[in-house]
Amino acid sequence: MGAIPGSADNAQQHADSTDSLVAAARDAARRDANVDAMALWRRAVAREPWRRSEWLLELADQTTYAGLAAEAVPLYREFLQLEERSPEEQRRARLGLALALSWSGELEESLREYETYLAWYPDDLQAQLGRARVLSWMNRNVESRRAYYQIVLDHPRNIEARRNLGRVDSWRGKHRAAERQLQEIVRRHPGDAEAVLFLAQTQEWMGRPDRAKTTLRTRLRADPADVNALGLLRSIERRERPGLRVDYRGSRQTDDLIIRFTTFAQDWFISQGLSTLGVRYQFQDYDPQGEEESVRVHRPGGYGRHRFNDIVEWTAFAFVDRIDVRRLDTVHWRFTYDTWLTVWPSDLARIDVGSNRTTLDNVPSLERNIVATYINLATDVFPNELWRAVARVKYGDFTDGNAQLWGQVEGERRLRTLPRMWAGLRATAFRFRDMLPNGYFNPSEYFSADATFRMFEPRGEDLRYALAGSAGFEHASPGGSKFIWSAGVRIDYLISGRFDLGGHLGHFSSATASSSGFARTTFGAQLRLVW
């Protein structure tokens, strides 16, 4: 039987068409047009499925870089099952699989792939870099830093290792050291977009938005299309726009006292974000229920903050309190304030020294015009990114002749990064000079110890929630020992670029079935408008 006319020509045209797809796919890959390259490889495989094994590795690579890492994982595994593959192809597939696993969130499995490969080829630089990166994503930053540091020792000119060493130091809270490292990289390689982004993030985290904005604007002048730099700059600028905040907080406690606070706050940022000036108005209503009239407090005031340098920042609130005791048809006036100086002697410690003058949150103390003036000292120590230790002490003089000495120590360890979880222990003790019947809790001696837990989780760009709780015991003299516990939840939602909405609910209790104790439930909502 003779050949079908034209069949050989059609086959040749089909082969030419497929080869054109392959050439176009490789050209798109060279231009980093990964989505186009992936689509072209898929068309080529669909046209000639018997050549799938020939193109499988390139298809897997472009699927990974197109942002579909989870779909690339089975492609790499299919390729690794093939019998005919060169050593270089096997290396590329192994490292590609490890990368795709990390990008798809399978960090434990990705780390196993990198470490298995490094057991056979310990000097492979790409595998070393991949392992260090995955360790950082797993919040194993001490190990990650050690890995990057070793790479820098072995390969002093490797920019990726140097850049990520600075990033890991920044994540560990070593912002000053990280800034120095990243500034040197950016000075030598001003076109390194990732280094610029890491540097700006570090500068923002260390309280220097002025330097962060300068870093980002310099980058955007060189490359206006850098969307990551533009996004971070807009985020910083949004936080520095004038904002009006309305905050409502209410509480109810076991003596049936209901307290309502409504606060209006307007802030303006100046000096490139280093200073903030604001006005405040707060209305407080202390409602004892029953037949007694509530005590109302009107508090107009102001707020100021200034960051002097990398080490020192000052913060202050000041109010004039008008205390309207309606039951007695009396009005009291008091000046109150809260101010402190913050010093960061290094990345490892923070010290706060300050003073505050405050009214007391109960009806008898407000009726008798009692205020307390405190001197405060607090020290936070951060030995690494996992641990935090805090010590606080304050001494207060009361206008009724009483005095209080108060102290607290706390230790906390971060358990997870996603979601962010911390657990710790806290001990609090204080004593009063006298036990006076003026409405505030003033035992001769008090001690409490409790375990603490908190969790914070951002959900995308718009939603954040936080949980907190504690449980322990307290001993007061007089008063005896009681079990204490607390729990709370907060949710914040970014409605739009101009509106934030938040709400919170909490409860504290030392009440038991065998004793009266004390309990308070708090609730509130907050709305913030950015002008």
Image: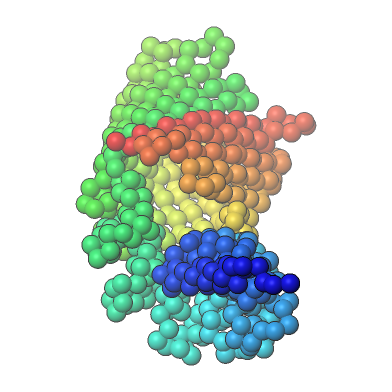
Q: Residue at position x 39%, y 30% from top? A: 246
Left or right of 443 in this view: 352: left
427 and 162: which one is in front? 162
- The N terminus, quarter of image: bottom right
Q: Looking at the picture, how far across and down is residue 159, in whole percent?
A: 40, 80
Q: Residue at position x 48%, y 24% from top? A: 260
The answer to whether residue 450 is visible is yes
Coloration mode: rainbow
The answer to whether residue 435 is visible is no
Number of callouts: 0
185 and 54: which one is in front? 54
Picture layout, residue 467 above or below residue 312: above
Give the quarter of the image for residue 482.
Answer: top right
Left or right of 311 in this view: 492: right
Residue furthest out toward the right: 514
Give the quarter of the image for residue 12.
Answer: bottom right
- The C terminus, quarter of image: top left
Picture layout, residue 306 above or below residue 147: above
Q: Residue at position x 54%, y 53% from top? A: 408
Q: Looking at the picture, how far across and down is residue 117, in whole percent?
A: 65, 83
291 and 384: which one is in front? 384
Q: Looking at the picture, how far across and down is residue 365, in whole percent?
A: 46, 27
Picture layout, residue 320 above or below residue 449: above
Residue furthest out toward the top: 291
Q: Residue at position x 43%, y 83% from top? A: 158
18 and 504: which one is in front? 18
Q: Looking at the picture, how far across and down is residue 147, in whole percent?
A: 54, 80
Picture layout, residue 435 above or below residue 123: above
